[in-house]
Image: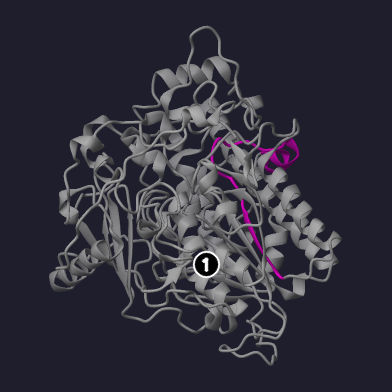
């Protein structure tokens, strides 16, 4: 660790020249995928930022994408901001149901139409770009939005002056769409996962460029916005939000990057997991004596049981994933290099994170995927070994590769265990701030801390610090996050109080953390469907359940969970989680909760005809 550089800016001050901000987000990136976090993937541009900044080993997001993005934008819990769950999962319970036998634990009906589950940033929050725009910042965005599908929910309505936004959860990275034959229809699971629906500023994008590839497209667009600022002589500081859709499935990447990883993963995910863990220990990113959680992947074959063809295709999927990560890095480099060329980089706060843990779902085992969708893929896509990674292929890499990236943690995306919520985070401070180049912070922090950090560095106040304020005439909530500025300037500084309480919930999986202690509730089949308790200081892998050994502490922490539910308006999906409400009859219909059914034939030509008025209900919650 290098010595801090001298500076005239202290933790409580703002420099005379306000800094720029570049916030970069990857989609479903695992903790150890980047080279600077223990991975073998080529990420020289992000590595350089890390070497000039700070890496965090205890930084947390939500367990899934749009909830994390809502927290980045608002500094408060996603259950308050309108993304209590992914709207895609609220809309159809089977989108996230790995087995018919346990569907009762995955039904999202009780959440439908409830406050905090609107599926877009609601009126209760004011966003970071709104406040920065009002304070004189140029606000720019290029990449994944996933916080509203309709024009009144576009980024431009929530503070961005210029925006090029991917609106849904995911899509084909090459914008490939098969031409259906006869009476064929898109399978239910795929309706919201292949159309590259975008908007620029206040209009839907009618046609993407023929050469479109998502990461390159967002890099080019962000670069064009920054060049336009330079060309106009616009001297306002900027806030640039740069969220990728990669490396979210379908796994697709340019051949030039895929070629870099040929043969790299031929020994399989278990060997990769051991290699990654060894590098993480060497880099000081996890304890030398850590006990990694065992891999949980009963629904797919073990590496030793695969045929040669199955192994080859599995390796190729991982090669494509790595290529997607490298392409992100190339586009980050493209933007950062331009800022350096124009003299702006020194005055720019740059940070990078993933929105959740690696995606480990074995979708081929899901009832909604089996049958119709698999037949559709065989007919309209080419998943031959040689074609994997191209626009007309459609694959994911499954739980074993994902757990190579989340190790030593337990499980992966969509679970509130550390594997689902612990994410890589790195940050480079602007010149003039005391900082420790190449340092590592072990301070607990979350994506909610980003908004208050940026507001403090910009010298901008939040209009509702006590939750009683208003923004443009409407009441808005306060931020639950805390500024990380002091920690970014001194890596040993804590962001949160030791007795602070932090909660997570996604699709009936739950967790609460206080200090080093954490309780976790994971329904069957991936968990025991009861509260488990861990001391993360001694057991970051969540291997040794201490619930029975310390029942008094467990009960105290369950009360913390109850308080979190009340404060944030969580609608639990299992009676064991307390404050449970059975779904009303009005909430039972499936697949009618999306404001814009853009996947239907003719919907993109006449969007207004495919809008749906989604009912909103009220819920009375009384304090304990």
**Would residue 102 be seen by someone viewing this image from the given angle?**
no
Q: Is residue 543 left or right of residue 281?
A: left
Where is 307 relative to 304, above or below? above
Asked which quadrant contains residue 565, the reply is bottom left
Residue at 58% from the left image edge and 45% from the top image edge: 247
State the colouring used for the structure image.
one colour
The quadrant in which the C terminus is found is bottom left
The quadrant in which the N terminus is found is bottom right
Indicate whether residue 291 is drawn in magenta. no
Q: Residue 577 at what x, y percent from top left?
A: 19, 55
Q: Residue 432 at what x, y percent from top left?
A: 71, 84
Residue at 42% from the left image edge and 50% from the top image edge: 412
Q: Is residue 337 left or right of residue 461?
A: right
Depth check, front residue: 418 or 287: 418
Depth check, front residue: 145 or 497: 145
**Would residue 115 be seen by someone viewing this image from the given angle?**
yes
Depth check, front residue: 364 or 161: 161
Residue at 62% from the left image edge and 77% from the top image edge: 458
Q: Residue 497 at what x, y percent from top left?
A: 37, 81
Magenta region: which residues? Answer: 237-262
Q: Is residue 248 left or right of residue 115?
A: right
């Amino acid at each position: 660790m290098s010595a801090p550089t001298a500076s005239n800016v202290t933790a409580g001050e703002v420099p005379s020249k306000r800094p720029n901000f570049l916030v970069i987000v990857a989609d479903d990136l695992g903790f150890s995928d980047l080279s600077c976090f223990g991975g073998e993937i080529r990420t020289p541009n992000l590595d350089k930022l890390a070497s000039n900044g700070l890496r965090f080993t205890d930084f947390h997001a939500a367990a899934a994408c749009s909830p994390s993005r809502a927290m980045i934008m608002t500094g408060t819990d996603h259950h308050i901001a309108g993304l209590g769950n992914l709207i895609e999962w609220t809309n159809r319970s089977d989108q996230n149901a790995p087995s018919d036998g346990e569907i009762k634990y995955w039904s999202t009906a009780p959440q439908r139409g409830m406050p905090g589950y609107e599926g877009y940033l609601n009126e209760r929050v004011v966003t970071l770009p709104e406040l920065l725009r009002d304070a004189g910042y140029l606000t720019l965005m290029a990449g994944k939005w996933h916080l509203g599908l309709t024009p009144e929910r576009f980024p431009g309505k929530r503070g961005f002056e210029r925006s090029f936004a991917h609106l849904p959860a995911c899509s084909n990275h090459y914008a490939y769409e098969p031409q259906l034959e006869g009476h064929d229809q898109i399978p239910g699971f795929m309706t919201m996962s292949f159309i590259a629906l975008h908007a620029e500023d206040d209009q839907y994008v009618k046609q993407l460029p023929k050469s479109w590839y998502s990461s390159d497209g967002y890099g080019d667009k962000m670069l064009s916005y920054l060049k336009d600022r330079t060309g106009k002589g616009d001297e306002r500081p900027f806030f640039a939000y740069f969220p990728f859709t990669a490396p979210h499935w379908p796994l697709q990447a340019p051949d030039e990057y895929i070629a870099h990883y040929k043969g790299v993963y031929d020994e399989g995910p278990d060997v990769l997991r051991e290699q990654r863990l060894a590098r993480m220990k060497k880099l000081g990113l996890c304890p030398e004596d850590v006990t990694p959680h065992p891999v949980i992947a009963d629904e797919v074959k073990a590496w030793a049981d695969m045929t040669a063809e199955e192994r080859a295709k599995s390796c190729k999927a991982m090669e494509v994933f790595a290529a997607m990560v490298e392409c992100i890095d190339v586009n980050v480099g493209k933007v950062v290099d331009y800022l350096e060329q124009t003299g702006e980089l020194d005055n720019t706060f740059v940070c990078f994170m993933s929105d959740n843990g690696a995606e480990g779902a074995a979708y081929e085992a899901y009832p909604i995927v089996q049958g119709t969708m698999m037949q559709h893929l065989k007919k309209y896509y080419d998943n031959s070994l040689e074609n994997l990674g191209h626009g007309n292929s459609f694959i994911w890499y499954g739980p074993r590769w994902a757990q190579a990236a989340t190790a030593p943690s337990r499980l992966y995306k969509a679970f509130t265990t550390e594997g689902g919520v612990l994410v890589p985070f790195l940050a480079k401070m602007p010149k003039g701030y005391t900082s420790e180049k190449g340092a590592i912070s072990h301070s607990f922090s979350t994506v909610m801390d980003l908004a208050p950090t940026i507001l403090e560095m910009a010298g901008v106040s939040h209009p509702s610090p006590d939750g009683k304020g208003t923004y443009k005439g409407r009441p808005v909530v306060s931020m639950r996050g805390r500024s990380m500025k002091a920690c970014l300037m001194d890596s040993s500084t804590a962001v949160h109080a030791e007795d602070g309480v932090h909660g997570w919930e996604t699709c009936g999986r739950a967790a609460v953390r206080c200090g080093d202690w954490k309780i976790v509730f994971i329904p069957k089949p991936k968990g025991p469907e009861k509260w488990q308790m861990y001391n993360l200081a001694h057991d970051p892998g969540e291997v040794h359940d201490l619930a029975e050994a310390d029942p008094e502490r467990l009960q105290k922490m369950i009360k913390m969970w109850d308080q979190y539910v009340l404060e944030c308006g969580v609608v639990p999906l299992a009676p064991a989680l307390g404050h449970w409400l059975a779904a009303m009859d009005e909430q039972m219909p499936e697949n009618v909760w999306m404001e814009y059914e853009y996947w239907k034939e003719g919907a993109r030509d006449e969007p207004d005809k495919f809008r749906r008025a989604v009912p909103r209900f009220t819920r009375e919650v009384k304090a304990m």
